[in-house]
Image: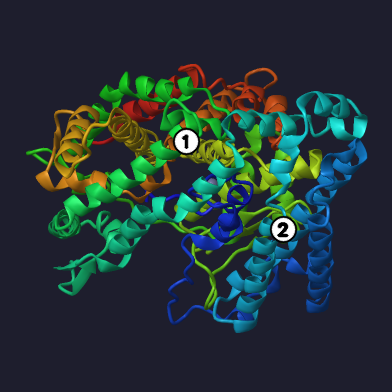
Amino acid sequence: MDDQARPKPAAELKMRTNESDAAARRFLMVMGMAMIATVNAATTPERAEVEERYKWDLGKMYASGEQWEAHYRQIEGMVADFAGRQGKVGASAESLLSALQLRDQVNIQLEKLYAYAAMKRDEDMRVPSAQALYQRAQTLAVKWDEAASWFQPELLKISEDQLKTWLKEPKLAVYGHYFDDLLRSRAHILSPREEELLAMAGKATDASTDVFGLLSNTELKWRLVKDPEGREIEITPSTYTAAMQSKDRRFRQDAFLALHHSYLDVKNTLAATLAGAVQRDWFYAKARKYPSSLARALDAENLPEGVYHNLLKTIEAHQRLLHRYVALKKRALKLQEGVHFYDLYVSLVDVPERTYSFEEGRDLVLEGVKPFGPEYVGVYRQAFDSRWIDVFENKGKRSGAYNMGTYLSAPYVLMNYKGTFDHVSTLAHELGHAAQSWFAKENQPPVYSGYPMFTAEVASTAAEIVFKQSMLDRTQDPKERAYLINQMLEDMRGTVFRQTQFAEFDLAVHTLAEKGEPITAEGLMKLCREQYVRYYGPDFVIDPELEVECLRIPHYYRGYYVYRYADSYCAAAAIAHRILKKEPGVREQWLEFLKTGNSKYAIDMLKVAGVDMTTPKPIEDAMSLFERLLGELERLLP
Ligand SMILES: [Zn+2]
């Protein structure tokens, strides 16, 4: 749902790290989320029973187990070679170039080795040999992180003048942006002793995040409620998500109260753990000489602070649209007294769920992304024709959907396709990630083959929006249109409004810490209520229990994380808007954007696509999309 992201391994692989996301965890994170096998029905086939053409073709990566083993040993040798360079990198332009190139090679080779093992494991998570392969890849990745940890500090010891001269040489010139990005950090690097102290503090400063995780995953007392069939079920964060979509209002209300009462039991503890996480962010910001935690968080991707405030201000100026949407929910669901939180997720339109065979889904997706132009559609076509996609569920397969793009292989996509509209949209979305990986790797040297975290969801979301719009354009049936529009509005409520509300809260609680003001359950819950009043308007009824919501959001422990969801959705909507309006040159700009990889900062990269996130314009574009859809839904619903 809206406070959970879809796993996005390709992006996580390239993610920049900081103290609370230790470098060694980089690879582990890739598969760390939602690592569960699909809960299979009895009719789910074994993998061997699924037709070959519906399985990804990993044989193109390694033809045999021996090949993987040989590659493993080769990479081990390269890692050892690299470790031996310590202390010698800055000796000459040649030694620098050779170290950088070796590092690039280890990165892309290891990425391939690792991705293959991860995908093999996900095919059937019950297979011990695949688990073992994956663990070995993981161990090698950690070893690589350790073996290379000296590298950046050593680069930073080379004088800037010396570097400037060297970077003029053609073979080193390509690393210009890499060094620009690295040298920005110089102002925030401390003396060796201070760095050592910060590293030592890591475990202690992460403690409150660990406590929150333990509490909310295992030790909280969850309550039982009766589901619509009269069976008792335990309401945990995961059963809660499904319950909120139930058509049975009594059940939704019970589930809502049950979950929030479980958190209310420990509200003071939760406020203390959140305060701990926020104090940690402020500690590292101060230690690294940033004026605020926000400045430090945005500096990781060289984002101007205006980007953050711009989002909050522009959404605030459009809150009346969300009020109107809530008023429509009240009318459509016939809720005299008003809309409660537990009414927000119910579909306003009852249509029998249609299903699409995979071939139908494929044709719809190929048709739907046509506005991006033939070169782009060609990559989607290749994905279907060259078996990049693992389509159906099988016993033991990992749940969900993801794209795994590497420099030395096709960008593969894992699906658990069941033919709902949601699954067809997910296919369009994941292929959007795949296409970006493809264009980046085909056009960039290894060092820039990823993409900035801030832009990671832009390409995929733009593809998804254009796809949904094309589905909408295909139907004149009022009920079907209403159904699709309702879905798109919910995407935007959950991703733009809700995440901006969270982003505002993030800023408020960090500001309390920075001003040295107390962070208490009472204060935070009051803030939460006040936000709901402003965001959801007069037709929304705030149950007192809702106030504790702010204490149960795991993303607040990741230090300014959620704004990315809202911002990238707006950037994607702005691009989709330009594509659908067929603005001159827009297709060329789109391809240029996809080909940029990591060779520019996020903000500059989005400018390539014609979107300037330092201005309100993209957010206003997203809001006008919302308004147009809302207007139509108001007319369509009785
Ligand atoms: Zn995604």
Along the line of sight, the residue nearer the viewer: 440 or 529? 529
What residue is disc 2 on? 147
What residue is disc 1 on? 287
Q: Secondary structure at mark 2?
A: helix
Q: Position of residue 42 (x, y in %)?
A: 44, 82
Identified at 62% across, 81% down, the residue is 49
Identified at 70% across, 68% down, the residue is 53
Identified at 84% across, 65% down, the residue is 77
Identify residue type, mark 1. Answer: Ala
- Residue 26 location, quadrant: bottom right
Residue 20 is left or right of residue 554, and the answer is: right
**In this rendering, the label closer to the viewer, 2 or 1:** 1
Residue 521 is left or right of residue 85, and the answer is: left
Residue 55 appears in the figure: no
- Compared with 554, 80 (above or below) is below
- Compared with 552, 323 (above or below) is above
- Residue 638 location, quadrant: top left
Residue 23 appears in the figure: yes
Along the line of sight, the residue nearer the viewer: 338 or 36? 36
Disc 1 residue crowd, few under 14, some 14–19, many 20+, Cα 10 Å: some
Along the line of sight, the residue nearer the viewer: 149 or 248? 149
Q: Position of residue 205 (x, y in %)?
A: 40, 50
Q: Position of residue 52 (x, y in %)?
A: 70, 72
Ligand 1 neighbours mark 1 (CB distance < 8 Å): no
- Compared with 370, 213 (above or below) is below
Q: Position of residue 122 (x, y in %)?
A: 58, 70
Residue 191 is left or right of residue 469, and the answer is: right
Of the two numbered discs 2 and 1 on the same chain, state the one appearing first in sequence.
2
Identified at 82% across, 68% down, the residue is 71
Residue sitting at the far left = 337
Identify residue type, mark 2. Answer: Ala
Q: Secondary structure at mark 1?
A: helix
